[in-house]
Image (tube, rainbow, N blue to C red):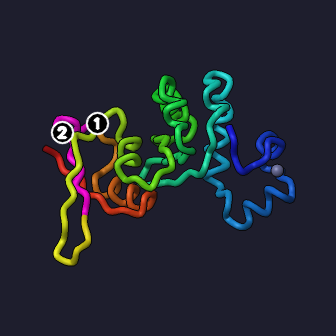
Amino acid sequence: MKTLLCSICLTNYPLVCNNCQEKIDSGEISELDVKVIRVLMNLEKSFPSLKDITFVRALQANGLIVVLVSRGDSRRLRPALRKIQRLAREELNSDIRVVEESRNPQHILRDLIRPVRILGINTIWLPDNSFERKVRISSRDQSRIPLDISRLEEIVYELSGEHIRISFD
Ligand SMILES: [Zn+2]
């Protein structure tokens, strides 16, 4: 796995080189990042596809850890993704979701709620000429979604910069 932390520090952590210490001090790498990186690194032996992915950062949201990876990486992990997420959850004591970096709110949401599918998206224009995207999900899937809906909407906004509204049909 490619990360901002060098491979030597990944092994020796909490001993870190000056270079990596600077990244930690500046907030470029957070404690949570290090924790998640180390868990995923340990899974590389069982899941070699993890070696090819780029870890961007991790963030915590109401009992869920979102692991941001580079574009194309969630496809690389796909066959093993659910197993990886399950094993990482045991180590981290928190549900985790691997999400590809994207400015597209639909892509972010798709990764967050996988394997639940998005039925469709409507754009709603507001009186002030701004718009909102309404994402439709089948009401049968509501119970399979790991987070409460307003939290999901917030995470999507945080990651994509766009507001969405989730509705169940
Ligand atoms: Zn280092």
Up-down: is 46 above or below 140? above
Residue at image location 16% in from the left, 76% down from the top? 127
The answer to if 159 sits in the magenta stretch is: no
Q: Where does the image place residue 155, in percent across and percent down from the top left?
A: 40, 56
Q: How many marks?
A: 2
- Whether residue 142 is in magenta: the answer is yes
Q: Is residue 96 visible?
A: no
* Residue 168 percent location from the top left of the image: 17, 46
What residue range appears in magenta? 132-144
Q: In the rendered image, which quarter is residue 53 located in?
A: top right
The answer to whether 121 appears left or right of 93 in the picture is left
Name the quarter where the N terminus is drawn.
Answer: top right
Measured Cα–Cα span from mark 1 to mark 2: 8 Å
Q: Is residue 150 left or right of residue 68?
A: left
Q: Residues within 10 Å of mark 1 (few under 14, many from 20)?
A: some
Give the residue type at disc 2.
Ser
Q: Residue at x 61, y 44 (%)?
A: 36
Residue linked to disc 1: 117
Disc 2 designates what residue?
Answer: 138
Picture quadrant of residue 21: bottom right
Q: In the image, what residue type sits under mark 1? A: Arg
Q: Is mark 1 within 8 Å of ligand 1?
A: no
Residue beneath the point at 30% across and 41% down: 145
Q: Is residue 135 left or right of residue 156?
A: left
Furthest toward the left, the residue is 169
Within 10 angstroms of label 2, few (less than 14), some, or many (20 or more) residues? some
